[in-house]
Image (tube, coloured by chain):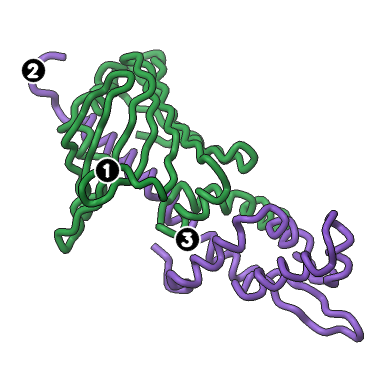
């Protein structure tokens, strides 16, 4: 069980950030860290300001970082944060697996009486 | 018991987990149909479940509470929408307030269970969880619901795999 890198408030922020399809898409495009906010804005049928807002939400959640290069601000997805969220995800995947594990154990017990 | 497959579909907001059990289908079904058996696996040992209502018929109602380490009770309910023993069960799964009334502000998940007889007396069980909206997933994620986390983050696996390639 790995939750040591995320507290509840941060996890909440991450999942709110991830609940939007555009923001998830921005994370994919910003993986290599070579896209500026204007580059990203060109990918979506929305205003520069709207895309800038999405990037800001991701930045507050720690999912991306901005780096100045010359006149541009490049957006870089923070893989560590995603992996921390992913570990949390796996913890919750384990919950259904645990449930099925218990299911299997109860099932394997000798049954009293006939079915 | 073996989990044989886990599928996440972020477009249809669905997670399906498939497992196989070395038991005949009627025995597997009993773990849903018998409340005393059901409550032994539905909640974790630290939050054991107690089913108060258990009416496994179409339109039937199931209510339960899970008791936490401090004695606190978390209430939930199922609204049964389809039952074909021992093959199929569908229900809506939601939260309730302290009095046991369904919470209108909290999302409901549609759960579809299918049992299929396999050769040699084994049974395959698939459990599909469908979320009403991305917002619902977000809300459930914030509440610590595993399914919510899974679906909201379904895309991340692909990103990381892409990155590793």
Residue behind mark 3: A88
Q: What whole-number distance in Å separates the C-alpha atoms at marks 2 and 3?
A: 42 Å
From the top left corner, tell me how far across and down residue B20 is, in percent.
39, 28
**What is the chain letter for disc 3?**
A
Characterize the local packing of mark 2: few (<14), some (14-19) or many (20 or more) Cα atoms within 10 angstroms.
few
Q: What whole-number distance in Å separates the C-alpha atoms at marks 2 and 1?
A: 37 Å
Badge nearest the viewer, 2 or 1: 1
From the top left corner, tell me how far across and down residue B26 is, in percent.
27, 16
**Residue B101, labelled with which disc?**
1
Vertical position of residue A40 compared to residue B162: above or below: below
Residue at point 61% right, 63% down? A17
Vertical position of residue A53 compared to residue B145: above or below: below
Residue at point 23% right, 44% down? B100
Q: Helix, strand or loop at disc 1?
A: loop
Which chain: green? B
Q: Is residue A100 left or right of residue A3?
A: left
Occupied quadrant, residue B18: top left
The quarter of the rendered structure image containing the N terminus of chain A is bottom left
From the top left corner, tell me how far across and down residue B3 is, in percent.
43, 36
């Amino acid at each position: 069980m790995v939750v040591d890198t995320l507290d509840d408030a941060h996890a909440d922020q991450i999942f709110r950030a991830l609940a939007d399809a555009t923001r998830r898409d921005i994370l994919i495009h910003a993986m290599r860290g070579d896209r500026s906010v204007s580059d990203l804005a060109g990918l979506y049928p929305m205003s520069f300001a709207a895309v800038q807002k999405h990037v800001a939400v991701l930045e507050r959640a720690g999912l991306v970082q901005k780096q100045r290069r010359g006149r541009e601000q490049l957006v870089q997805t923070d893989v560590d944060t995603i992996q921390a969220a992913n570990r949390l995800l796996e913890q919750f995947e384990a919950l259904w697996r645990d449930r099925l594990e218990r299911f299997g154990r109860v099932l394997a017990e000798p049954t009293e009486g006939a079915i | 018991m073996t989990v044989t497959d886990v599928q996440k579909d972020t477009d249809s907001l669905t997670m399906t987990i498939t497992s196989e059990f070395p038991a005949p289908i009627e025995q597997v079904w009993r773990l849903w149909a018998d409340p005393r058996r059901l409550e032994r696996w539905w909640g974790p040992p630290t939050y054991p479940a107690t089913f108060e209502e258990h009416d496994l018929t179409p339109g039937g109602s199931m209510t339960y509470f899970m008791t936490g380490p401090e004695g606190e009770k978390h209430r939930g309910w199922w609204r049964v929408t389809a039952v074909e023993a021992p093959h199929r069960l569908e229900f809506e799964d939601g939260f309730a307030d302290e009095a046991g009334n369904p919470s209108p502000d909290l999302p409901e998940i549609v759960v579809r269970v299918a049992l299929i007889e396999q050769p040699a007396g084994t049974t395959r069980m698939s459990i599909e969880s469908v979320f009403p909206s991305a917002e619902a997933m977000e809300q459930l994620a914030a509440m610590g619901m595993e399914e919510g986390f899974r679906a909201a983050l379904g895309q991340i696996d692909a990103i990381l795999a892409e990155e590793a390639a």
